[in-house]
Image (cartoon, grey):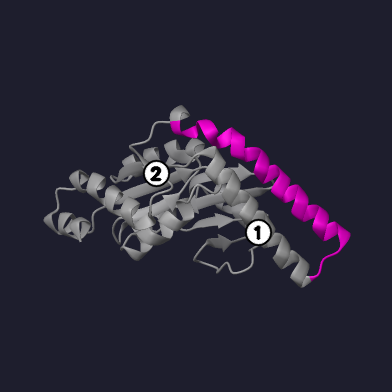
Amino acid sequence: MARRLLVTLSGGTCSGKNYLLSQMVGAGFQRVVSTTTRPPRDGEVEGVEYYFISDEESRKIEAEDGFAELMQYGAFRYGVTKAEFDDKLAKGACVLIVEPKGMESYTEYSRHIGAEHFSVFVDTSYLIREGRFQQRFFEDFKKLEAGGYDAAGAYRFLVNYGSRHALLQEENGWGKAYKFNLLVDGTRSAVDNTDLIKDHVRWLSPSPDFARWMRG
């Protein structure tokens, strides 16, 4: 039986957590995929970044107690179903990006099904995140210009980025406000941070096969 371990990644906007997630998946971790009621962005693939569902579908799953965790973020709902959670954990060590305030739900559910949970915070300074955010803004605005847009589209774009920018400062205290098993430096390479995480979670498992994989 595969070792049931969930590693959650948390971090502020532009902290580098998505790069770390991709590296960990490439290193053999199973990616737990959340549902969302927001529309897909350019390049996002169904079942890879998210499962894109309607608000009605999300509320139906909630009514049937089908979510391991559910959050409202702005106008949209995000949640990992218990079926997705159980399926990925059955295949081995898993990784998932979560908001710190939703982390306790995963700790409780992991404990409920006999799995272990290891929380990681990607710690990146505000100045670095601000610089990355501005770069992302200009890159996305160029795409908007290239595709053509009307006044309403430009307004929605600016409002969206304005609300996301307001979160940058709010997120500054996350590393100290919540308890994490490990803080990693968001300016280090994703490869180095993946190795660091594997080193720290190896002790959680008594399985020789799991320990050998973690050393790989």
Mark 1 against mark 2, which lies toward the viewer?
A: 2
Identify the secondary structure beneath mark 2: strand
Q: Which residues are magenta?
A: 148-175
Query: With respect to residue 106, does 194 lie above or below?
Result: below
Residue at 38% in and 60% down: 23
Identify the secondary structure beneath mark 1: loop
Query: Type of residue at label 1?
Result: Ser
Q: Which residue is mark 1?
A: 54
Q: Quadrant of residue 117?
A: top left
Asked whether residue 59 is in view, the answer is no
What is the crowding at mark 1: few (fewer than 14 residues within 10 Å), some, or many (at least 20)? some
Dominant secondary structure of the residues highlighted in magenta in the image = helix
Residue 118: assigned label: none
Q: CA distance from mark 1 to mark 2?
A: 36 Å
Q: Which of the two residues, 101 or 12, is positioned nearer the viewer here? A: 12
Q: Which of the two residues, 70 or 42, is positioned nearer the viewer here? A: 42
> Does 131 lie within the magenta span?
no
Q: Quadrant of residue 184?
A: top left
The residue most toward the top is 177
Q: Quadrant of residue 42?
A: bottom right
Q: Position of residue 108 (x, y in %)?
A: 38, 38
Q: Position of residue 18 (x, y in %)?
A: 48, 55
Residue 185: assigned label: 2
Given contact means CB atoms under 8 Å apart, are the residues at marks 1 and 2 in contact? no
Decide if residue 200 is on the left or right side of residue 69: left
In the rendered view of the protein, which quadrant contains the C terminus?
bottom left
The residue most toward the bottom is 147
Residue at 21% in and 44% down: 204
> Does 163 lie within the magenta span?
yes
Residue at 61% in and 43% down: 72
